[in-house]
Amino acid sequence: MMNRKCMICGSVLSEPLFLAENMPLGAQAMPTGEEIKAGMDHGIRLDLKRCPVCGLTQFDCEPVGYYKKVIRAVGLSKTMQDLRRDDYRHLIDDYGMGGGKWIECGCGNGDFLKVLKEFPVEIYATEADAGNVSVAREQLGLAEDHIMEFFPDRADMDIPGAPFDVFLSFNFLEHQPDPVSMLSCMYRNLRAGGMGLITVPSFEYILQEGRYYELVRDHIANYDLPALTALCKRCGFEVLEQGYIGIGDTLRVVVRKSAGGMGSDGVVHLEKCAEHNGKSRKVSSNDKYLVLGRNYKDISSKIEAYMAELSAGGRSIAMWGASHQGFTIAATTALKDHVRYIIDSAPFKQGRFAPASHLPIVSPEHYLTDPVDVILIAAPGYIREIEASIRERYADTAAGIPAICDVLSFEER
């Protein structure tokens, strides 16, 4: 269902900038075999639009049904754990935030909080999913007044334990159809001078690299730095830092609760923000979005040629990574007709199927009894880590190490 209104400022959205066909219903909408037989899973069209006032690029559709809860498999990754350690150490060493009360907004099963336990802070968290809350409490040894089954969806909500010194939001804001209310709630529950650290996927990265397969319905909001910082300021925050982390695919901002600025309804209104002032701010040409269509055609043709080459040589292929990137690229290209299965280390994904493409998702051990000639890594941020794991895991097995390639190059090694 299309709303045609910006989720941040309510302005009328542009005409579609990119139409994505046969897209997965969601990154976590992994159907069972029975659901596929019943016709409960199918590809959808997504309309990517932009707000001419605040500049946010967004999908004009309903959010996924599970947007309030965090489903996070990458929390187990060493790469991600090291990023979180760097984030926490930075706030403590450079801003003196050690010893305070920290709260993560959307903690999932507590993986990132396990890393936070290494630091001298008092841990709190909110999470909408009761199962996640139970696991997080058990993993961290914290009571219900610290790991709360709670979703901050109103600006005037009081969070038990407030005021907090620091709030954390890791790749959660992009799922929210009402980000203003969520951030305004965080603002309300911080102490004066309290800080926040927010990460979201980078839409600049998607455009600069032309990676259409980074688009997914779960990420209903596609932030660039100007849109993200404007949102933070709208909610009363002072933006202290803004930049990119990882391989440039993630935005990170550090914010501070500034004095005053909130309206009676708990929101800093657009007309009070100097960078908006009730007028459309300058946005770049729609031409930059053409790269998404070009990239789709380029990748599709490369994959079609590569699949033809593998078929001619009688060689088989599997994918590694039941990620949103893998799901999108499988559903929208010839991969869906040639890949035997998708390997993923997350147990909750195994035994299900990729949305739209219906490729089976299996454990890494599946390869030992059903080997393939090539494994295609479909998680761009973790290519080196996954490749190293493949080589180590299968080195001394009868199946042996397959040829390895990735979605960035499609070159075997």
Image (cartoon, rainbow, N blue to C red):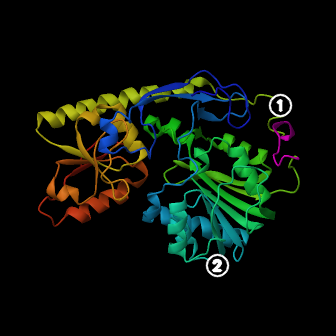
Give the percent coordinates (x, y) of residue 115.
53, 71
Image disc number at residue 236:
none
Classified by dominant secondary structure, the portion drawn in magenta counts as loop
Q: Is residue 177 above or below residue 388?
A: above
Which quarter of the rendered picture does the N terminus lie within? top right
The span picked out in magenta is: 264-273
Image disc number at residue 278:
1
Upstream in the sequence, badge 2 or badge 1?
2
Q: Relative to residue 22, is residue 373 drawn left or right?
A: left
Q: Is residue 146 magenta?
A: no
Who is closer to the viewer here, 301 or 9?
9
Would you identify the image quadrant in which residue 393 lies? bottom left
In this figure, which residue is indicated by the disc labeled 2?
Answer: 120
Residue under the image location 54 percent in, 61 percent down:
130
Question: Is there CB contact under 8 Å for labels 2 and 1?
Answer: no
Q: Is residue 267 magenta?
A: yes
Q: Relative to residue 400, is residue 174 drawn left or right?
A: right
Give the percent coordinates (x, y) of residue 170.
58, 56
Circle 1: residue type:
Gly
Q: Relative to residue 4, is residue 262 drawn left or right?
A: right
Q: Residues within 10 Å of mark 1 (few under 14, many from 20)?
A: some
Can residue 123 be seen here? Answer: yes
